[in-house]
């Protein structure tokens, strides 16, 4: 079972999700994340996916649903992401986690909004990174996969047969 907000979002976008992942897509359990402030002196290495990356897992297609659990502004460490065009444009700068790890781009996108605002994105194709908040930032997330994805030991998968 997922939180009601996740269920509503998936059901609202069910036809688009099924069109992208297939009718019998599966999901991992929902997770809530809190990102904390990290002093500049401690930011020399990755702390919580705060460098540009893609989520490859074991396929090339997945969707993540992100839901803001509180209002998020630019100083609250929003999720930064690049469109597919931007990902191609900046590929040489961001394709390795150690290269330009936290570089900002003038045309990058950030996920800000009020509590309950959500975004659905294929993080296996779009470069993205967590922002570092001035205090903290809370977000709910669930990952959706095509049904052909190989499961992992101990993983609980939810089947969406609607």
Image: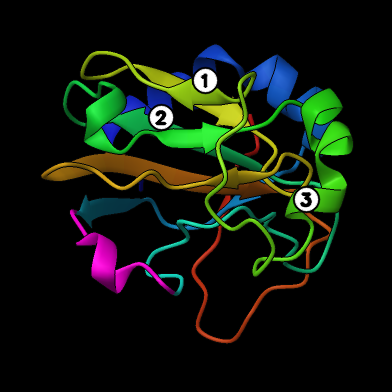
Q: Splitting the image into 4 quarters, where does residue 43 fall? A: bottom left
Whole-percent x, y for residue 156 in the image:
49, 68
Res 29 label: none
Query: Where residue 76 appears, x then y in whole percent?
Result: 23, 33
Residue 71: horizontal and vertical position, in percent? 18, 20
The residue to which callout 3 is attached is 93
Q: Which residue is mark 2?
A: 7
* Residue 43 sits above or below residue 71 on the image: below
Q: Which residues are magenta?
A: 37-44
Residue 154 visible? The answer is yes
Residue that numbered label 1 is attached to: 11
Q: CA distance from mark 3 to mark 1?
A: 37 Å
Nearer to us of marks 3 and 1 is: 3
Q: Is residue 144 left or right of residue 154?
A: right
Secondary structure beneath disc 1? helix
Mark 2 Cα-neighbour bin, 10 Å: few <14, some 14–19, many ≥20: few
Q: Are marks 1 and 2 in contact (CB under 8 Å)?
A: yes
Q: Closest to the observer: 8 or 89?
A: 89
Q: Main secondary structure of the magenta part?
A: loop
Residue beneath the point at 75% across and 42% down: 24
């Amino acid at each position: 079972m997922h939180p009601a907000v996740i269920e509503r979002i998936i059901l609202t976008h069910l036809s688009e999700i099924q069109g992208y992942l297939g009718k019998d897509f599966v999901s991992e359990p929902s997770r809530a994340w809190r990102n904390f402030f990290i002093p500049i002196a401690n930011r020399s290495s990755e702390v919580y996916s705060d460098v540009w990356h893609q989520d490859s897992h074991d396929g090339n297609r997945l969707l993540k649903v992100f839901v803001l659990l509180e209002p998020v502004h630019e100083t609250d460490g929003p999720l930064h992401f690049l469109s597919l065009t931007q990902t191609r444009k900046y590929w040489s700068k961001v394709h390795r986690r150690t290269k330009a790890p936290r570089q900002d781009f003038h045309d990058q996108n950030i996920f800000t909004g009020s509590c309950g605002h959500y975004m659905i994105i294929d993080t296996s194709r779009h470069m993205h990174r967590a922002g570092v908040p001035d205090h903290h930032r809370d977000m709910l997330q669930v990952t959706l996969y095509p049904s052909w994805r190989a499961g992992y030991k101990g993983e609980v998968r939810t089947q969406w047969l609607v």
